Image: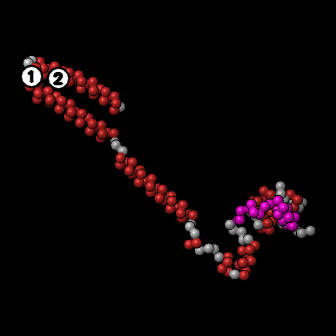
C-alpha cells in the first residue's frame, strides 16, 4: 500500500488543479480517500482514469503534457513557443476592431451633431422671416390699393380699410396655428 498524499500532491499527480481535486474528492475519488484526509495515489489514478474521458478535457495552459516533457529532453527547440508571426494575434485583432468601432461611432456622432438643428436660433430665424413676410403683405396693400380701387370703381380709402382688416384677421389666425404647431 502506497503512502497517502495530500490534495495538492494528488492534483500534481493527476495533472489537474487543486480545485478539481476538491470537487472530485466526495464523488469520483471517494474510494481513494484514506482515514487521515489523505489520498491513495494509485487508487486515485485508477478511479480518475476510469471516470474521466481525457478527450473531453481541456488542456491546462501551464501544464506540460508527457510528449512535451520528453521532447524538451531530446530537442530544446521542440518545447519553444511558436513565433508571434505564425498566426493572427486575437487580442491585437480585437483591440484593433474595438478601436475602429470607436472611431466609426465618433465620426457618426460628429456627423449627427453637425446635421442637428438647434431650436432657439431656428425659431428666431422663422420669427424674423414671418415678420418680414407679414410686413411685405401689408406693404402690398399700401402699394396697390389705389390701382385696385380704380379698377373696381370704389372709394380707395374704403378698399384700403377692408383689405387691411381681412388681411390682419387672416394673419392673426395663421400665427395662432403656427404657434401651436411650434410648441
Residue 120: x %, y % from top left: 32, 39
Residue on which the image places disc 1: 151
**How many angstroms separate mark 1 from mark 2 (CA)?**
18 Å
Choose top left, top right, bottom left or bottom right for residue 162: top left
Few, some or many C-alpha atoms within 10 Å of disc 2 (few <14, some 14-19, many ≥20)?
some
Q: Is residue 140 left or right of residue 14?
A: left
Q: Quadrant of the C terminus?
A: top left
At x 80%, y 68%, the residue is 13
The foreground one among 40 and 92 is: 92
Kindly identify which residue carries mark 2: 164
Which of the two labelled residues, at mark 1 and mark 2, occupies the earlier sequence position? 1
Looking at the rendered structure, the secondary structure element under dot 2 is helix
Segment tinted magenta in the rendering: 36-60
Q: Quadrant of residue 36?
A: bottom right
Within the magenta stretch, is there residue 24?
no
Please give the name of the residue rendered at 27% of the width and 24% of the height, measured from the top-left corner: 173
Amino acid at each position: 500500500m502506497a503512502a497517502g498524499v495530500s490534495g495538492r500532491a494528488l492534483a500534481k499527480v493527476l495533472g489537474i488543479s487543486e480545485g478539481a481535486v476538491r470537487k472530485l474528492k466526495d464523488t469520483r475519488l471517494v474510494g481513494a480517500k484514506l482515514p487521515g484526509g489523505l489520498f491513495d495515489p494509485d487508487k486515485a489514478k485508477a478511479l480518475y482514469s476510469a471516470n474521466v474521458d481525457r478527450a473531453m478535457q481541456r488542456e491546462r495552459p501551464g501544464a506540460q503534457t508527457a510528449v512535451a516533457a520528453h521532447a524538451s529532453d531530446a530537442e530544446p527547440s521542440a518545447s519553444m513557443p511558436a513565433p508571434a508571426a505564425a498566426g493572427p494575434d486575437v487580442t491585437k485583432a480585437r483591440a484593433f476592431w474595438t478601436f475602429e468601432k470607436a472611431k466609426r461611432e465618433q465620426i457618426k456622432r460628429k456627423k449627427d451633431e453637425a446635421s442637428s438643428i438647434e431650436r432657439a436660433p431656428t425659431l428666431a430665424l422663422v420669427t424674423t422671416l414671418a415678420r418680414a413676410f407679414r410686413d411685405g403683405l401689408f406693404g402690398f396693400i399700401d402699394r396697390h390699393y389705389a390701382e385696385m380701387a380704380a379698377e373696381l370703381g370704389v372709394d380707395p380709402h374704403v378698399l384700403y380699410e377692408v383689405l387691411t382688416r381681412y388681411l390682419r384677421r387672416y394673419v392673426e389666425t395663421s400665427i395662432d396655428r403656427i404657434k401651436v404647431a411650434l410648441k
